Image: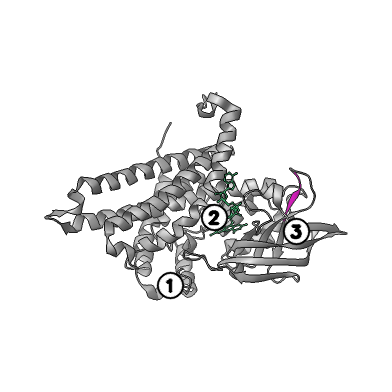
Amino acid sequence: MDFTITPEIEDYRQRIAQFVARELLPLEADRANYDAHENIKVDVLNQMRARAKAEGLWCLQLQKETGGQGLGKVGMAVCYEEMNRSIFGPVVFNSAAPDDGNMQVLEKVGTDKQKAEWLQPIVRGHVRSAFVMTEPAPGSGSDPAGMMLTTAKKQGDSYVVRGRKWFITGAEDSDHFILIARTSDDPRKGLSAFLHRKDTPGFRIERRIPIMGPEEHGGHCEVVYEDMVIPAENLLMNEGDGLKLTQIRLGPARLTHCMRWLGLSKRCVEIASEYAQNRFAFGERLSQRESVQMMIGDLAMQIEIGRLLVMKAAWELDRGGFARKEVSMAKVHVANLLHKAADTAIQINGARGYSKDTPLEWIYRYARQARLVDGADEVHKMVLHRNVEKEGRDFWKWDAGA
Ligand SMILES: Cc1cc2nc3c(=O)[nH]c(=O)nc-3n(C[C@H](O)[C@H](O)[C@H](O)COP(=O)(O)OP(=O)(O)OC[C@H]3O[C@@H](n4cnc5c(N)ncnc54)[C@H](O)[C@@H]3O)c2cc1C
């Protein structure tokens, strides 16, 4: 086992770290740079995106021929963590959800024509994209294969879509949509994936759902399909491959969430440590108190456990595996870690932690979604249990290689 990173990855890491420290942390500290939904203002974002592009720090997740940097998942794990030291980081480098996962899946499964038409505008930063799967009850949430109610019925060379979806991140500002809808009752091959634009007749955004945390650009929307017609050439993969496409998209997308969340968790420790070193109470620095040392030491350890889980999954994906178990374990651990890191850092910062003078309260509110999005903790643990039942003691087997 070799945990050394290549000089190329280290070079990207250093340049991203410098960009974040030089450009983004000062912006993040000034409320004037925030939009009404507590994200980076679009005009400021566009300036920063132009700089990130000019410095060759754009779309690390994509192949060079697609317009990216070709870093692979291990390289991304190193760099995403670094970029999310700032809450503004991922969107500046075009590595924020949901564009990040949408670009990766389009690069992997799109035809050349689909890549030119649907992927390239996102890569260039000209449009945003959304992934449309979840439905309000009684439709599909944790169980898309079993419960999806939105239908796409074949009529000649087209499909006619009817249904309602919600929590669609970025929908209000997106132009390209990847929609998952039911095309048959087959339990494995019943769903299909489609591409459509925002202005397609029959599609509308019903509302931007108010949420407890800060919002991605375009919010989280409830959307309605009323006999929207999609040409068959806008099928992604083949009819019946919707569940497969979802799995191809969500594995890496869940892992990149973890990579970013590790960066945010480290930032929480950074702010907590700095305060503990400089704040006195009862004649001592807070950092001299064993109880405070235990809190920060424990977080540091939990972050390292998260990094090892993420790196193992990244390594497995880079060598062509699916890393399903590894991604599930990383997702559950890091989602809970992020919540704990923000909570602990607020506690150590006292009243300051509860204020908007640091990003801790932002991270705390944001963190609560981590245990729900892309599979709730309980669903991932259910999947892990299935694996334990199936594999027994082999669940933990080492790959002995050739
Ligand atoms: C901020 C945010 C952004 C999102 N963005 C998108 C998006 O862009 N596109 C999209 O399609 N969706 C999106 N979602 C939806 C997200 O993927 C779903 O919330 C998630 O899949 C869970 O579905 P659900 O909310 O319907 O929960 P439900 O299926 O209603 O489950 C509710 C709860 O039941 C429990 N539960 C469920 N299954 C089990 C089980 N097997 N065993 C034990 N307990 C269980 C869990 O605690 C779960 O939290 C987003 C959600 C949020 C909060």
Look at the numbered discs 2 and 1 and tell me whether their residues touch, using CB distance below 8 Å. Answer: no
Q: Earlier in the sequence, mark 2 or mark 1?
A: 1
Residue 212: give x, y in percent of width and height: 48, 64
Residue 84 picture quarter:
bottom left
Q: CA distance from mark 2 to mark 1?
A: 27 Å
Quadrant containing the N terminus in the rendered view: top left
What is the distance, in whole Å, between disc 3 and disc 2 at their CAs? Answer: 24 Å
316 on left or right of 130: left
3D distance between C-alphas at marks 1 and 3: 36 Å
Which residue is disc 2 drawn over? 68
User: Amino acid type of disc 1?
Assistant: Tyr
Q: What residue lies at 58% left-to-right and 27% top-to-bottom?
A: 391
Q: Residues within 10 Å of mark 3 (few under 14, many from 20)?
A: some
Looking at the rendered structure, the secondary structure element under dot 1 is loop
User: Which residue is at a point 77% across and 66% down the rendered structure image?
Assistant: 228
SS label for mark 3 = helix
Q: Which residue is mark 1?
A: 34
Give the label, 2 or 1, closer to the camera.
1
Extreme-left residue of the structure: 283
Instruction: Tell whether 193 sits left or right of 83.
Output: right
Reading the image, the residue beneath label 3 is: 234
Q: Can residue 3 be seen?
A: yes
* Amino acid at pointer 3: Asn
Q: Earlier in the sequence, mark 1 or mark 3?
A: 1
Seen as rendered, the residue at the extreme front is: 138
Residue 191 is a magenta residue: yes
